[in-house]
């Protein structure tokens, strides 16, 4: 199985069960991290989060999942929690339904507002999360089970 750190790209013949076993996690945890309602349905080419750093003692926030992760259009509870934090910071371009778990243009526009609030300009305020701005946002950590 080919991995990129905390991520795995689904190949022909993969099952969520086999992926979970390979990475020492559970099917349920993979479903939660990747917002997969039916564990029997994964798609070839789908990029999955296969591990998340356990929080350090006293850690309360989601570690930065990496810039590339956002560009895969993730569908994850982490995205919805990020949206909730952006609303708390009064950086919201969300419609009446609020933030979804699926990364979309509203998330990117809201995140760009956050970056500008932090003083970033130009390409540094393009709405794609970076480690510095993510760390300052402090998205609450929780174990998804």
Image (cartoon, helix red, strand yellow):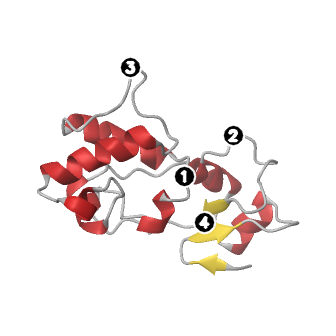
Residue 135's quadrant in the figure?
bottom left
As drawn, 108 above or below 7? above
Picture coordinates of residue 43 (x, y %)? 77, 55
17 relative position to 89: left or right: right
82 relative position to 71: left or right: left
Q: Which mark is residue 37?
A: 2
Q: CA distance from mark 4 to mark 1?
A: 16 Å
Instruction: Name the residue furthest left.
Output: 119
Q: CA distance from mark 2 to mark 3?
A: 24 Å
Residue that label 4 marks:
50
Q: Are marks 4 and 1 in contact (CB under 8 Å)?
A: no
How many discs appear? Answer: 4
Picture coordinates of residue 39 (x, y %)? 76, 48
Mark 4, mark 1: which one is toward the viewer? Answer: 1
Q: CA distance from mark 1 to mark 2?
A: 17 Å
Residue that label 3 marks:
96
Assign a secondary structure to mark 1: loop
Residue that label 1 marks:
73
Mark 1, mark 2: which one is toward the viewer? Answer: 1
């Amino acid at each position: 199985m080919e991995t990129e750190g905390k991520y795995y790209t689904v190949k022909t013949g993969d099952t969520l069960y086999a992926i979970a076993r390979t990475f020492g996690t559970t099917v349920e945890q993979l479903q939660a991290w990747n917002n997969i309602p039916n564990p029997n349905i994964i798609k070839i080419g789908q990029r999955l989060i296969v591990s998340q750093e356990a929080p350090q003692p006293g850690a309360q926030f989601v570690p930065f999942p990496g810039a590339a992760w956002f560009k895969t259009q993730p569908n994850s509870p982490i995205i919805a929690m990020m949206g909730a934090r952006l609303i708390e910071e009064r950086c919201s371009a969300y419609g009446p339904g609020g933030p979804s778990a699926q990364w979309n243009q509203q998330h990117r526009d809201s995140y760009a507002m956050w970056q500008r609030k932090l003083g970033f300009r130009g390409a540094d305020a393009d709405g794609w999360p970076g480690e510095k701005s993510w760390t300052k946002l402090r998205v609450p950590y929780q174990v998804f089970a």
